[in-house]
Amino acid sequence: MNKEKLLALVQPDIDRINETMRSELAETGNSLLVQILEHGIFNGGKRIRPLLTILAARLCAFTGMPEGLAPEDELQPPVNLYRLAMVFEFLHGASLLHDDVIDNAGERRGNPSANAVWSNTHVILAGDYLHTRAMTLAGVIGGGHVLSLIGNATSAMIEAEFLQIQTAEGINLSEENYFAVLRGKTGALIGAACEVGAYFADASEEYQAALRTYGNALGLAFQVVDDLLDYLGDRQKTGKAVGNDFVEGKMTLPLIYALNNCPQKEGDDIMVLLRGESDERQAHIDLARRFIEKHEGFTYARQGAETLVEAAIEALTVFPDCQARKNLEGLAHYVLTRKK
Amino acid sequence: MNKEKLLALVQPDIDRINETMRSELAETGNSLLVQILEHGIFNGGKRIRPLLTILAARLCAFTGMPEGLAPEDELQPPVNLYRLAMVFEFLHGASLLHDDVIDNAGERRGNPSANAVWSNTHVILAGDYLHTRAMTLAGVIGGGHVLSLIGNATSAMIEAEFLQIQTAEGINLSEENYFAVLRGKTGALIGAACEVGAYFADASEEYQAALRTYGNALGLAFQVVDDLLDYLGDRQKTGKAVGNDFVEGKMTLPLIYALNNCPQKEGDDIMVLLRGESDERQAHIDLARRFIEKHEGFTYARQGAETLVEAAIEALTVFPDCQARKNLEGLAHYVLTRKK
């Protein structure tokens, strides 16, 4: 299935997710708060997380869905599924708002970041608000089990951020550490988005576990590709400065592999840059990129992402062959080909 | 009942709340994160919110409690009530951590504030973590209704912060606006803490509403007294600089009343200071205090707090006369006499 066909197939769900989010935000009383939330949420995001919840639920075929499915909705998921799916985009949006303050970045996806438009106070509070609304919806719609899954994923995300900050203090060349951070920061919530969809559709534990495995692997692949795009992406498309991770001294898979698999002399030059100042690294982005290229860091990371996508698709083989499964397979392939 | 007797009566509950919080934090994996959470939570807080949840539940006599009450616990509330009560202290702690970043203050209660010890990144993330854990516990232990009550109170808190920021941009002399901010910022969560205790104890709707009314009024009284202590408190006891609200140009009840009830000429001098720079106000704290004193702003605010405490106590008259009710009455009186 090509990308255009996949996007056309999922577009109605994305539209309905956006619509659901708009009507949810309309319940917020303070107009300035609404502005900041809209800036945080309607910023060109791809809606991958809520879409996964919908697709996972659809794959589980809505068999035995406990409530909310009227006869006329047989082919259409109930509105509560969209509201539950939205929780993942709200949580993602809340963490992006707080990241804007933390990173003190001026831009996000080519637009001014929230903290460039409003004060840190406003942006921190708006993130807290989105977080509260997300958790409340998760528990009220999904019940205690769903709330636990989401709460655990969010806690894991924050613990992984701490791990990342702590390991960034040295220069950590461990792939294991790199993947541990990824699992918490990206894998856990995407895995939960898939698992929650299955649980909502009253799927068997086997199906829930399969979709969690799919989501975890997809989340890791997504992030590895993100780290590749940081070096190799087109700024026009990604909206991010090329080589930003290197400038920040952030150790990602391409660089880790190259440093672990090069003659010591060449590695030492890069290590000197990593131990030095960021403006020195800014001036040597091309050098770093050539170094990684030469020592096959990009190839290795790309292969890693492909292996993860294969694992994600493999996890789906417990399901019957149907359009919903094809869509999830297509989404996994799309992760590998995305340019932004 | 004098203050010492009241404190002795509630101390076992406070100890058990602290114990419950310690064992909850022990489940967090990252040791740096735990340090920040402990700094945020074990900082001399009075545990008013969780204590109210316990006392409200006890007042409702644990009749028909749906689950968790084993025969040997008949005189002792079940552990889940303490875990649910703890949610309010966690939420309070999360908002204090974020306030530390927002205010960029160096101190809280006479100790270094979290942002003075760790980076904003650490403190924002630690607040998010506490928030996530609180909301998850609320829903898993209390169910959907409790989660909604807490979610709505937290949303109201944030909307009130926005209202406060927006009105701080002008010099707002409206008492109505002052109380609207207070209801959201303090009343809503304290009201919810009381209502949740009643709901957990399976109390009637009348009892739930009575305890919510008690909590809302108590929360407002608490905050009015806080605003009085800001001008009149002993720095050694409050751990806060005297006159801080005036220096920040924050309009609180004593100042609002005095400005609305003084000869124009005298008010104009204060308005000039309020429109000017904060270091000018810093130099004129004594002048402001004398101005408020002369025009009976402190007397008026004190009477307002007393009226609110009476309303809180009045709300309890639907309950039979028992020790639990006496404790809640005592706590309301304590709000008026507290020095910190």
Image (cartoon, coloured by chain):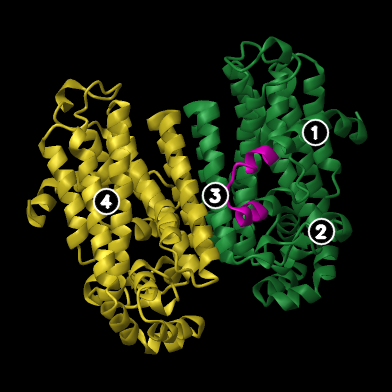
Chain colours: A green, B yellow
Residue linked to disc 2:
A239
Tag 3: residue type?
Tyr
- Nearer the N terminus, badge 1 or badge 3? 3
Q: Are marks 1 and 2 on the same chain?
A: yes
Left or right of A240 on screen, residue B20: left
CA–CA distance in space, label 3 to label 2: 27 Å
Q: Quadrant of residue B177?
A: bottom left
Residue linked to disc 1:
A331
Callouts 2 and 4 close, C-beta under 8 Å:
no
Residue linked to disc 3:
A129
Label 4 chain ID: B
Marking on residue B48? 4
Residue A55 colored magenta?
A: no
**Magenta range:** A21-36
Q: Helix, strand, or loop for circle 2?
A: loop
Tag 4: residue type?
Ile
Label 3 chain ID: A
Q: Position of residue A279 (x, y in %)?
A: 73, 77
Tag 1: residue type?
Leu
Q: Quadrant of residue B265?
A: bottom left
Q: Does B114 sit above or below residue B88?
A: below
Residue at the image position 51 percent from the left and 50 percent from the top? A159
Residue at the image position 44 percent from the left and 89 percent from the top? B280
Label 1 chain ID: A
Q: Specify few, some or many for label 4: CA neighbours under 10 Å numbering under 14, 14-19, or 20 or more.
A: some
CA–CA distance in space, label 1 to label 3: 31 Å
Q: Specify few, some or many for label 1: CA neighbours under 10 Å numbering under 14, 14-19, or 20 or more.
A: many
Q: Point out the frontmost of discs 1 and 4.
A: 4
Left or right of B118 on screen, residue B55: left
CA–CA distance in space, label 4 to label 3: 23 Å
Q: Does A172 sit above or below residue B314?
A: below
